[in-house]
């Protein structure tokens, strides 16, 4: 293995934003549908899925009307944008990670189930975006995580084979998407775990 490419998930890997998305979706659900996702089902079922996929599941469960799906999604994105602008700050440690990889001629990209607008806000405000060669959002593919399409797309864009690729993930859905491709998968608990020391220990 000769690491040429590192692919990072976004929420919970580069930015601890999972709770921000959770809070924004619940606010939109309560406003429009009078329901919410509790913490247990968020962690066991919904975490890591795109908003529209979450809403499809809630529709099947009879907790959301199909006619409200787009309205809830749009309201959630409005609330998310407000939260990201307010809470997302520069992250010197992640900037150090990216700089360390860049110095070793390792290409970095982000593969996320977030929409592009949300992803770009988080990456720019964190100080990470300038280091990345690209972002694959859920708008760039037909099948988001737990499907592997996002990671396959990123490797194809970078022109790097799986054997020379490292994928950093946190959620079960993301781990599922990253597994079985032939890449090295690093599982982290949250974004605080992503440090230069971790990269140094795991990347060859």
Image: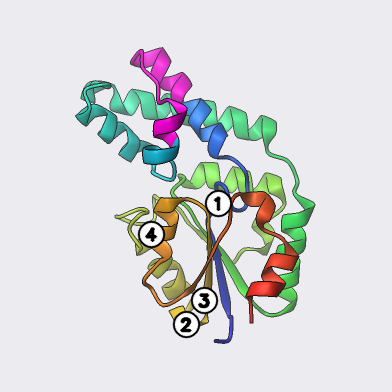
Measured Cα–Cα span from mark 1 to mark 2: 22 Å
Closer to the camera in the image, 137 or 25:
25
Q: Residue at x 47, y 31 (%)?
A: 77
Does label 1 or label 3 sit earlier along the sequence?
1
Q: Earlier in the sequence, mark 4 or mark 2?
A: 2
Name the residue that disc number 2 marks.
163
Q: Is residue 9 visible?
A: yes
The answer to whether one can see residue 78 in this image is no
Q: N-terminal of the two: label 4 or label 1?
A: 1
At horizontal 30% and vertical 55% (from top left) the residue drawn is 143
In reply to whether residue 159 is colored magenta, the answer given is no
Q: Which mark is residue 176?
A: 4
Write down the residue under mark 3.
165
Of the residues under marks 4 and 3, which one precedes in the sequence?
A: 3
- Quick one: SS at disc 4? helix
Mostly what secondary structure, the magenta segment?
Answer: helix
Q: Which contiguous range is marked in magenta?
A: 26-42
Q: Are marks 4 and 1 in contact (CB under 8 Å)?
A: no
Q: Is residue 161 above or below residue 100?
A: below
Q: Name which residue lies at 45% across and 23% down.
A: 26
Q: Are marks 1 and 2 in contact (CB under 8 Å)?
A: no
- The residue depicted at 60 percent of the width and 73 percent of the height is 107
Q: CA distance from mark 4 to mark 1?
A: 15 Å
- Is label 2 in contact with label 3 (beta carbons under 8 Å)? yes
Task: Count neighbours of disc 3 (C-alpha within 10 A) and say few if under 14, some if 14 to 19, many if 20 or more.
Answer: many
Q: Which mark lies nearer to you, 4 or 3?
A: 4
Specify how the rendered protein is coloured: rainbow
The residue nearer to you, when weighing 151 against 77, is 151
Badge 4 crowding class, 10 Å Cα cut-off, few under 14, some 14 to 19, many 20 or more, is some
Which quarter of the picture shows residue 109? bottom right
Report the residue marked by disc 1: 10
């Amino acid at each position: 293995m000769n690491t040429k490419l590192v692919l990072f998930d976004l929420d919970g890997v580069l930015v601890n934003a999972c709770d921000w998305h959770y809070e924004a979706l619940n606010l939109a659900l309560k406003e429009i549908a009078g329901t919410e996702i509790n913490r247990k089902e968020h962690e066991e079922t919904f975490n890591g899925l795109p908003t529209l996929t979450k809403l499809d599941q809630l529709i099947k469960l009879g907790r959301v009307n199909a006619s409200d799906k787009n309205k809830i999604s749009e309201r959630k994105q409005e609330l998310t944008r407000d939260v990201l602008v307010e809470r997302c700050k520069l992250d010197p440690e992640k900037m150090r990670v990216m700089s360390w990889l860049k110095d070793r001629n390792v290409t970095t990209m982000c593969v996320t189930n977030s929409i592009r607008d949300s992803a770009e806000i988080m990456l720019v405000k964190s100080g990470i975006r300038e280091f990345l060669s690209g972002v694959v959002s859920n708008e760039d593919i037909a099948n988001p995580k737990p499907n592997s399409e996002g990671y396959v797309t990123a490797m194809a864009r970078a022109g790097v084979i799986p054997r020379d690729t490292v994928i950093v993930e946190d959620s079960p859905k993301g781990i599922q998407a990253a597994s079985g491709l032939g890449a090295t998968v690093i599982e982290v608990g949250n974004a605080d775990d992503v440090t230069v020391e971790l990269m140094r220990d795991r990347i060859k």
